[in-house]
Image (tube, rainbow, N blue to C red):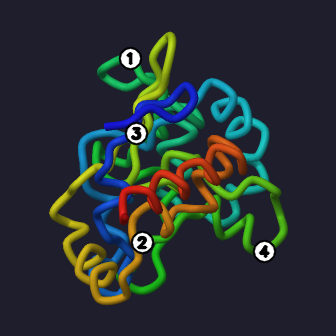
Amino acid sequence: MFQLGKTIVSEDILGKDFVCNLSACKGACCVDGDAGAPLSLEETKILEEIYPKVKPFLRKQGIAAIEAQGTWVNGTDGDLETPLIDNKDCAYVIFDGKTALCGIEQAYNQGIIDWKKPVSCHLYPIRVKDFTEFAAVNYDKWDICDPACSLGQELEVPVYKFVKEALVRKFGEDWYAELEKVALDMKK
């Protein structure tokens, strides 16, 4: 672990390799697990605002879950999350054949909305836990992502490079530039 501004960062994001391999995992992170995607308070407001524009991209089961539970929920641990369909799939998940994709991101890709998706999804496999004085930035190792780890090793892409856009979105360009300096220093 090392400190970077008001973050405590796991060295695993520099030392582990990762590149999503949707052809192998089929987007399992959107349908497996026991909780929705973590959200910030600001993101809950965004979801409420964009839902009418995202709704046409969603499956009927997702629409039913959102209309029953809301565009976001308080999870069992009290954290803000995306709602789930039958305690499994994210309510915003859609499918391209057998591959899970994000309905929010599809609306973004088509220029309907200007918000890509929750930052926690964009950052994955990095998870950020906010505390009063700092944020913990950790690599979340999940066996469903083994194909992504293998592809990352093959392509020699460390986690922090794979999620660069999301890290800049979350922490800013200056923070990311400092992270790159730490990564270079660690290679020496």
Between the residue at mark 4 and the residue at mark 2, the CA separation in whole angstroms equals: 17 Å
Residue extending farthest to the left is 143
Q: In the image, which is nearer the foreground, mark 2 or mark 3?
A: 3
Q: Which residue is mark 2?
A: 100
Q: Mark 1 is on which residue type? A: Gly
**Nearer-N-terminus badge (2/3):** 3
Q: Mark 2 or 1 closer to N-term?
A: 1
Assign the C terminus to one quadrant of the image. Answer: bottom left
Q: Give x and y (percent) for residue 3.
A: 44, 32
The tag earlier along the polypeptide, 4 or 3, is 3
**Where is residue 92 shown, x and y percent of the image?**
53, 55
Q: Which mark is residue 9?
A: 3
* Structural distance between the alpha carbons of marks 1 and 4: 33 Å
Residue count near mark 4 (Cα–Cα under 10 Å), binned few <14, some 14–19, many ≥20: few
**Cβ atoms at labels 1 and 3 below 8 Å apart:** no
Query: Which residue is pictured at 59% across the width and 63% down the height?
Result: 103
- The residue singled out by tag 4 in the image is 110
Q: Residue at x 62, y 24 (%)?
A: 41
Mark 2–mark 1 distance (CA, rounded to whole Å): 26 Å
SS at mark 1? loop
- Tell me which label, 1 or 4, sits earlier in the chain: 1
Residue wearing tag 1: 78
What amino acid is at disc 2?
Ala
- Up the image or down, 99 lies above or below 160; here it is below
Residue 102 drawn above or below residue 36:
below
Three-letter code, disc 4: Gln
